[in-house]
Image (cartoon, rainbow, N blue to C red):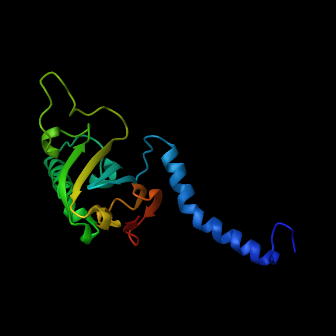
Amino acid sequence: MSPSCPRSPRHCRRAAGLALAALTPLLALGAFAAEPGAHVHGAAVLRIVADGAQLEVTLESPLDNLLGFEHAPNTERQRASVREMAAKLRQPQRLFTPTAAARCTPAGVEIAAPTLPAALIGNPQPAAGTRADAASGAEHADLDATFRWRCDAPAQLKGLDVGLMQAFPGLRVLKVQVAGPRGQSAAVLSAGTRSVAW
């Protein structure tokens, strides 16, 4: 036996392999998160903050995941797709389910997508003289959405079921970062794994 491994070398190799397998999703999340503004089609970042009675979820995603394109809409069909996407995002109760016992109610949604016309995503028109809703000309475009809830029994808030991938099939992986009452954690969600616990 090796002095660094009190059991058999085979047992230690197996334990090391299991530890590496458990860390792989977290390492992938770290690599993704280390690149500010990382733009990966099929993947998005979800940040969850549970602070007292407040629950806030922020989605950062390439527009392609949600729309199938990343430019200002050119046709009526594309404009309809933008309106449909915004309507889905403005119904957080269909996209997220906080722990039922926490009795959380939606308290607001904000959507920011500079490439898309403000009116199509349900935002007030920008002030005269600004072009916040104009296409930037960039090759890639993103959307940020923030969802807020107020919870009547925050001590009961233990997690969140996420239905984003069912609502938006172009979204295949969610890199999740959680800041909750027990500290910070990370997870990776896919079509088969849609719950985050803390």
Query: Where residue 138 appears, x then y in whole percent?
Result: 35, 34
Look at the picture and state if 142 lies above or below 175: above
Most foreground residue, 103 or 165: 103
Query: Where residue 156 appears, x then y in whole percent?
Result: 30, 68
Most foreground residue, 54 or 44: 54
Query: Where residue 123 appears, x then y in whole percent?
Result: 15, 41
Look at the picture and state if 167 lies above or below 141: below
Q: Residue at the spot x=37%, y=41% of the render?
A: 140
Q: Quadrant of residue 93?
A: bottom left
Query: Where residue 80 appears, x then y in whole percent?
Result: 14, 52
Left or right: 14 with respect to 106? right
Looking at the image, which residue sits at the far top?
129
Is residue 161 shown to the viewer in this render? no
Is residue 122 shown to the viewer in this render? yes
Left or right: 196 with respect to 33? left
Left or right: 149 with respect to 38? left
Q: Residue at the spot x=14%, y=44% of the render?
A: 120
Look at the picture and state if 177 lies above or below 138: below
Look at the picture and state if 185 lies above or below 74: below
Quadrant containing the C terminus in the rendered view:
bottom left
